[in-house]
């Protein structure tokens, strides 16, 4: 009968197998492999492209095989977000530097989110449940509590800061989403802002005196300056509650 383990040639009347796809299909799927594939799709094509069908295509399999590991797309997005959150580092809480530490963590979250297209959209409307997101939330609360921020204020600040960071990242992604490269995205934003400036300048001054008079101030600040200003407002507001507790 011969050795059954010997690979047989493909009969000439059969189409040869597509080895790449077959190898991918035979590869045992795990949650980790699925999340990694979903992140590749995200970084290359954006969040809207992350569907169960598209991720399955990336893995060379069908959507049904993904549902054996994830109940739905939302569950997959949560795990993607948590894996990305692993890139964020936290300082050891320092009571003397707590305000600057709050800002440092906010800046790092922003940069990590910005490094993965529009992943911040997946952060909106969700409560952290994954280990990495819980680590970040715990670290932020620990920093504020070390600075004497009352528990209720720290809890509200945690939520508000998250919304502020997400909104900033999402706006940045939306403003430059038509650019195929960072340079093109930046150019698109510059053109749009110049058009807005021209429009504001052309407004009737008697009806919109402040908008017309302040057009330079309204249009001058870049993304980083606006983010830093908003972040400073947040931290000053949080600090005012901590000072109130101390002085009271």
Image (cartoon, rainbow, N blue to C red):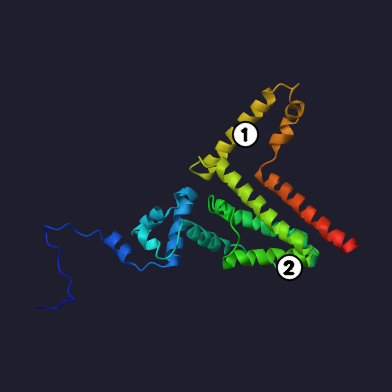
Residue 93 or residue 31, whichever sits in front: 31
> Residue 221's quadrant in the figure?
top right
Secondary structure beneath disc 1?
A: helix
Please count the marks in the image. 2
Q: Residue at x 71, y 69 (%)?
A: 92
Classed neighbour count for the residue bearing mark 1: other residues with Cα under 10 Å, few (<14), some (14–19), many (≥20): some
Q: Earlier in the sequence, mark 1 or mark 2?
A: 2
Q: Nearer the viewer, residue 156 or 92?
A: 156
Give the farthest residue toward the front. 71
Residue 72's disc number: none
Q: Position of residue 1 (x, y in %)?
A: 9, 78
241 over 230 or under it: above or below: below
**Disc marking residue 193:** 1
Q: Residue at x 64, y 64 (%)?
A: 136
User: What's the residue at 56%, 51% (across, down)?
Assistant: 121
Residue 71 picture quarter: bottom left
Q: Is residue 226 left or right of residue 82?
A: right
Q: Is residue 172 left or right of residue 142?
A: left
CA separation, marks 1 and 2?
Answer: 40 Å
Mark 2: few/some/many CA within 10 Å (<14, 14-19, 20+): some
| Quarter of the picture holding the C terminus | bottom right
Under circle 2, the secondary element is loop
- Please name whichever residue, 203 or 67, is drawn nearer the observer in this view of the structure: 67
Q: Quadrant of residue 190?
A: top right
> Which of the pair 196/49 is nearer the observer?
49
The picture places residue 235, in percent across and down from the top left corner, at 76, 54
Q: Is residue 22 left or right of residue 147?
A: left
Q: Which mark is residue 93?
A: 2
């Amino acid at each position: 009968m011969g050795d059954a383990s010997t690979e047989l040639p493909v009969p000439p009347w059969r189409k040869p197998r597509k080895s790449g796809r077959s190898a991918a299909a035979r590869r045992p799927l795990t949650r980790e492999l699925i999340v990694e594939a979903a992140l590749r799709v995200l970084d290359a094509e954006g969040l809207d492209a992350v569907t169960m069908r598209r991720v399955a295509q990336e893995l060379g399999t069908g959507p049904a095989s993904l549902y054996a590991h994830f109940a739905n797309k939302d569950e997959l997005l949560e795990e993607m977000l948590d894996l990305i959150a692993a890139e964020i580092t936290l300082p050891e809480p320092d009571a003397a530097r707590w305000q600057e530490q709050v800002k440092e963590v906010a800046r790092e979250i922003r940069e990590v989110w910005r490094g993965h297209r529009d992943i911040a959209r997946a952060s909106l409307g969700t409560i952290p449940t994954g280990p990495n997101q819980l680590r970040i939330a715990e670290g932020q609360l620990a920093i504020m509590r070390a600075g004497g921020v009352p528990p209720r204020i720290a809890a509200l600040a945690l939520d508000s800061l998250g919304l502020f960071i997400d909104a900033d990242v999402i706006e940045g992604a939306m403003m430059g989403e038509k650019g195929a490269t960072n340079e093109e995205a930046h150019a698109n934003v510059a053109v749009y802002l110049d058009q807005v400036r021209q429009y504001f300048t052309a407004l009737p001054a008697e009806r919109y005196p402040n908008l017309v008079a302040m057009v330079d101030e309204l249009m001058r600040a870049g993304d980083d300056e606006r983010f830093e200003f908003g972040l400073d407002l947040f931290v000053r507001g949080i600090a005012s509650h901590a000072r109130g507790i101390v002085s009271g």
